[in-house]
Amino acid sequence: MGALSLGSPPSKLSDGLFGNSFGQSSAFGHIQPNSGPPNATAEQMFPELSLPRRRLNLPTQKPIRGRADIPNSPWETESSRAYNTEPGDTPMAASKALVLSSVNGEDPSIFYQEHFAELYQLIEGWAMAYCTRPKISNDQAIARTNQSLWAFMMECTYPGQRQGAHSHLMLLLNDAKSRPWFVVRMGVAYVVEEMLSLKSYKNFNPQVTAELAAVKAQLQERGLANDARQALTDRRAKAIQSAVSSPHWEKYRSEQLFSHSKELRAILGPMLNDSADRSTAGKDLGVIALKAWEISEHMNTAQVTFQVYFPETAGKFNAATMISRDNTDTSPMNLQISQTRVKLVITPVITMRDDRGTTIKAKNLHFSTVLTMA
């Protein structure tokens, strides 16, 4: 991996936004996210915020089969390994990134599909409202003076391949069509690795920390039976449920939301258009943080496991797990047959796994949205 993995957020990033509070602006249109308990407003939570020749920009190194593992990622456990989904296993969607696997209102996958859709719409709305104009000099300045942020951005393209990542990143940023989508990827990458994972809970208290570490170690053991794996999943959910029900939870939650919102501002602030209202943009990032935290609490207190991964840049388009955002006139299967390559992975593939019962149930919650190479 490069200097900064997606599992390790930038620790010293210059704050690119200025504002006194968080709220919701008209940039999000009709979207009205559930922002937590009625008595916990966003303003109350955040009172303090003020090499070789290249072709098609493909990597020059030898490709690695399968998806690249992310060292120390909270998702890399035995219960969250990648699934091989064959074409036809999941209903195809022509224009939506979410695939409904059941019409049963009791199916928990429907809840997560809807809430992931709302979260991604919020991030996409933010990027399209505030980050649409290429700024070459600004991007070059980030590469020179903000190494941690630039490393994070490169990890969103070719993890561990600095030369290929740098040139490909500049290509994406200098294109007005791809720039906002890359900003979406930056926001989604941070939310997935830092807010939806167990990282947000492991420091609640020593007991929760120890229990989560113990469960993680046992889940990584090979050859676990389904009932044993489910028992560990239940232990993990119970540990986080104990934290959420604690009288100290609201204080911890507010502190975490403040920290995550500050990091989002530090990461995404430098990508703003010069004409963007920074105060309003900062408020809207607070809405995104609140929505992500809401989903995180539901995910990590559930007695199921989630497998989340970003497909590889420059990999072949896969109709079973991807939806193109820029090549909508061509059917997904034709994109796969023509071996179209992926230029940018915007959102990850998300699968929910349920080990309860006599059979393992795995459902695709979300296709990966991508941009393709011409």
Image (tube, rainbow, N blue to C red):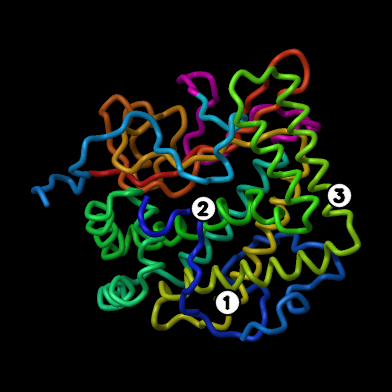
- Residue 361 is left or right of residue 4, and the answer is right
Amino acid type shown at disc 1 = Gly
Labels 2 & 3 near each other (Cβ < 8 A): no
Amino acid type shown at disc 2 = Gly
Under circle 2, the secondary element is loop
Labels 2 & 1 near each other (Cβ < 8 A): no
- The disc, 2 or 3, on the residue closer to the chain's N-terminal end is 2
Pointer 2 residue: 7
Residue 242's disc number: 3
- The disc, 2 or 1, on the residue closer to the chain's N-terminal end is 2
- Residue 221 is left or right of residue 317, and the answer is right
Q: CA distance from mark 2 to mark 1?
A: 23 Å
- The disc, 1 or 3, on the residue closer to the chain's N-terminal end is 3
Pointer 1 residue: 282
- Report the residue at 51% width, 33% height from top: 93
Amino acid type shown at disc 3 = Ser
